[in-house]
Image (spheres, grey):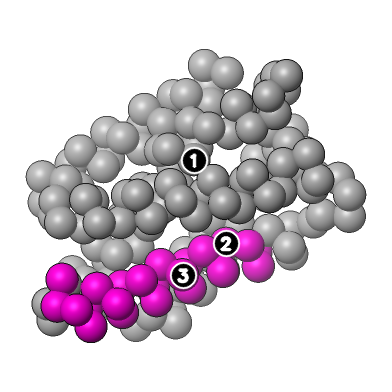
Amino acid sequence: MLTNVIIGMLIPWIFCIFLFIKASKIVILMFPLGISIAFMANDWGYNLFWVVTPTHENPSLSAMPFSIGYFPLLTCAFTYIKIRYNVGSIFLIVLFTITTTSFEFFAVSIGKVNYYGGWNIGFTFLIYLAGFIVCALYMKVLYRYRIFVK
């Protein structure tokens, strides 16, 4: 569990602190979105399709550090890169989806994440794809209401 806390929460929070110094508005607005997407996806999938080790009586406990660290960092980084470097949404969605799916494939390969119930890396790709599409759509809303300005 210590590994989950360090890799899933502490290291991402360190990056988020640096990102907060550079772009506080992005972190303030996007970090909660990342947490929401992570908990929605993980609460749906746990015990049905995947489990993160070590297992506990509450199976979602092992993934909680990732839900409040790694996944929110991804939404903040996605948004920062999109705004700072003016990268196209489709390219960025595909890039982040492939990258995060690759990280999860590594986690599956080393036994940190276990799939069952017919779940596979292709479905994982689709879950990440949906999450980054939601992130991009939320950014459009923030632009529409001039919370983010081009």
Among the two numbered marks 3 and 2 on one chain, the one whose residue lies closer to the N terminus: 2
Disc 3/disc 2 C-alpha distance (Å):
10 Å
Q: Which mark is residue 49?
A: none
Main secondary structure along the magenta-highlighted residues: helix
**Quadrant of the rendering where the N terminus is positioned:** top right
Please rate how many residues cluster around mark 1, counting C-alpha atoms within 10 Å: few if below 14, some from 14 to 19, many from 20: many
Q: Which mark is residue 67?
A: 1
Q: Secondary structure at mark 3?
A: helix
Q: Which mark is residue 128?
A: 2
Q: Amino acid at mark 2?
A: Tyr
Query: Vertical placement of 13 versus 23: above or below?
Result: above
Find the magenta span and give its range.
Answer: 125-147
The residue carrying mark 3 is 134
Q: Is residue 134 magenta?
A: yes
Instruction: Tell me residue 88's x, y (percent).
Output: 34, 82
Disc 2/disc 1 C-alpha distance (Å):
13 Å
Q: Is residue 7 magenta?
A: no
Among the two numbered marks 3 and 1 on one chain, the one whose residue lies closer to the N terminus: 1
Q: Secondary structure at mark 1?
A: helix
